[in-house]
């Protein structure tokens, strides 16, 4: 019995450690705007790994709490996502997060998951001040494949095209 | 002599302190005697302890003034709407979303005119909620009648059911919107008593602020359930009525002088 308890707690400590390590590793890549509220934090509002898979559930839960119960103070508001993750153009104007090279748009475009939050919700913080051009903006989303004129180019090996065909 | 009285006092103090402690312990577990206002309104779910409403004194509402309408438009991003290219301006005038309409009514017998802003009346028994097939049209615990756009399918039954023509339908995709006021094609919307201000614990609406700034003070906003609120005091002072009171909707917005 005592052994089982010890083993169980060891496993949970190990799991927590692994999760922390993952989160820390993920936090190494910067997906937030330098100088924003998020930049000062180690993680997103939840561990990064969790957010990548479950952000839609988190936002959906918050939306009901906000619309029906008026609860707006949690970390899980869409407005909060945008405030932290919005990028700024060279002129200092905020760029809509659903643009195909911006935080929401880039992934959703790549995964071919249609995003309709922004049919109604603002894609930039409403009261976004103009910002001086921030260093580190270029290549912020370099972890994603490059964007072509009509969306992402998939990195598929192309067969050689030449006059050698049979 | 002094020394003795000090000794007696300290003995009484400790006894009274213990007695008070016992009294608190006895009362506290079962009954909450008084609920204090929430320290952070943004984190507390709304309750039916409050019911928001307004009193509009039409004798103070000036002919030709539309400060409340403009303020509402700016607060809720209605001024960011754009007429779709090629649309007949007369049609746009009918379709553009409006949360407040400035109305002039006349008593045909006496010729007396009254001006009033007409918006969602935040009924206790809202017909728009009765008819909604998806429960998108709902009444919050604090009495605010609003639309959950995540559920709205745009059928517009609520617009037909509303006796006050308070609701608008968004016909086209909306390019510019505010964070505090989401808006999109295919959903119905109406006055929500500046719900973002309610959730932030502010105590006025955009239209009230504008009316005060114009010096008319025709609108009083407050909590109908709070006997100390300026609204309840104004309601006790002025004769007021509901528009279409024959429908027995128990509106949250009351009018005086009509």
Image (cartoon, rainbow, N blue to C red):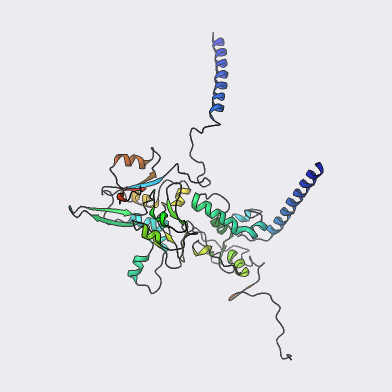
Q: Residue at x 54, y 25 (%)?
A: B23
Does the image show residue B94?
A: yes
Percent coordinates x, y for residue A69 in the rendering: 50, 49
The image shows residue B130 at horizontal and vertical percentages of 41, 54
Give B3 or A67, whichever is nearer the viewer: A67
Front in this rendered view, residue A15 or B145: B145
Total numbered circles: 0
Would you place residue A26 above or below residue B51 in this image? below
Looking at the image, the residue that sits furthest to the right is: A3
Depicted A61 relative to depicted A98: above or below: above
When the figure is inspected, residue A152 is found, relative to residue A93, above or below; the finding is below
Residue B243 seen anywhere in this rendered image of the structure: no
Q: Taking B102 as reference, is B42 left or right?
A: right
Residue situated furthest left in the rendering = B110
Q: Which percent across, then down, holds residue B146?
A: 43, 54
Residue A65 left/right relative to B258: right
Q: Return the residue nearer the eye: A142 or B105.
A: B105
In the image, farthest residue toward the top: B1
Which quadrant of the figure has residue A106? Answer: bottom right
Q: Which of these two is toward me, B208 or B226?
A: B226
What is the quadrant of the N terminus of chain B in the image? top right
Find residue B155 and report its horizontal and vertical position in percent: 43, 63
């Amino acid at each position: 019995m005592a052994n089982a308890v010890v083993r169980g707690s060891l496993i949970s400590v190990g799991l927590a450690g692994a999760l922390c390590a993952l989160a820390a590793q993920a936090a190494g890549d910067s997906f937030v705007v330098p100088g924003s509220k998020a930049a000062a934090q180690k993680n997103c509002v939840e561990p990064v790994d969790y957010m990548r898979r479950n952000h839609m559930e988190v936002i959906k839960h918050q939306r009901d709490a906000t619309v029906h119960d008026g609860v707006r103070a949690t970390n899980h508001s869409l407005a909060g996502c945008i405030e932290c993750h919005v990028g700024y153009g060279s002129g200092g104007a905020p760029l809509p997060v659903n643009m195909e090279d911006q935080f929401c748009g880039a992934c959703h475009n790549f995964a071919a998951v249609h995003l309709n939050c922004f049919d109604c919700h603002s894609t930039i913080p409403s009261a976004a001040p103009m910002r001086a051009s921030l260093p580190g903006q270029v290549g912020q989303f370099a972890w994603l494949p490059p964007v072509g004129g009509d969306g992402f180019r998939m990195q598929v090996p192309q067969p050689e095209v030449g006059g050698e065909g049979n | 002599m002094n020394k003795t009285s000090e000794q007696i006092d300290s003995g009484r103090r400790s006894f009274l302190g213990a007695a008070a402690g016992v009294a608190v312990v006895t009362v506290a577990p079962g009954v909450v005697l008084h609920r204090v206002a929430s320290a952070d309104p943004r984190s507390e779910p709304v309750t039916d302890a409050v019911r928001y409403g307004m009193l509009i004194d039409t004798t103070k509402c000036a002919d030709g003034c539309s400060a409340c309408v403009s303020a509402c438009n700016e607060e809720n991003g209605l001024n960011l709407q754009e007429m779709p290219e090629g649309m007949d301006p007369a049609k746009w005038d009918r379709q553009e979303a409006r949360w407040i309409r400035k109305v002039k009514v006349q008593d045909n017998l006496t010729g007396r005119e009254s001006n009033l802003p007409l918006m969602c009346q935040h009924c206790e028994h809202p017909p728009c909620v009765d008819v909604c097939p998806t429960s998108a049209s709902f009444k919050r615990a604090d009495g605010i009648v609003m639309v959950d756009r995540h559920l709205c399918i745009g059928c517009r039954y609520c617009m037909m059911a509303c006796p006050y023509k308070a609701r608008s339908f968004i016909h086209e995709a909306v390019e510019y919107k505010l964070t505090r006021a989401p808006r999109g094609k295919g959903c119905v919307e109406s006055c929500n008593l500046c719900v973002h201000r309610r959730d932030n614990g502010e105590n006025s609406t955009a239209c009230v602020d504008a009316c005060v700034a114009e010096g008319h003070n025709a609108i009083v906003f407050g909590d109908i359930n709070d006997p100390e609120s300026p609204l309840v005091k104004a309601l006790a002072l002025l004769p007021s009525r509901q528009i279409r009171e024959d429908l027995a909707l128990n509106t949250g917005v009351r009018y005086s002088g009509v």
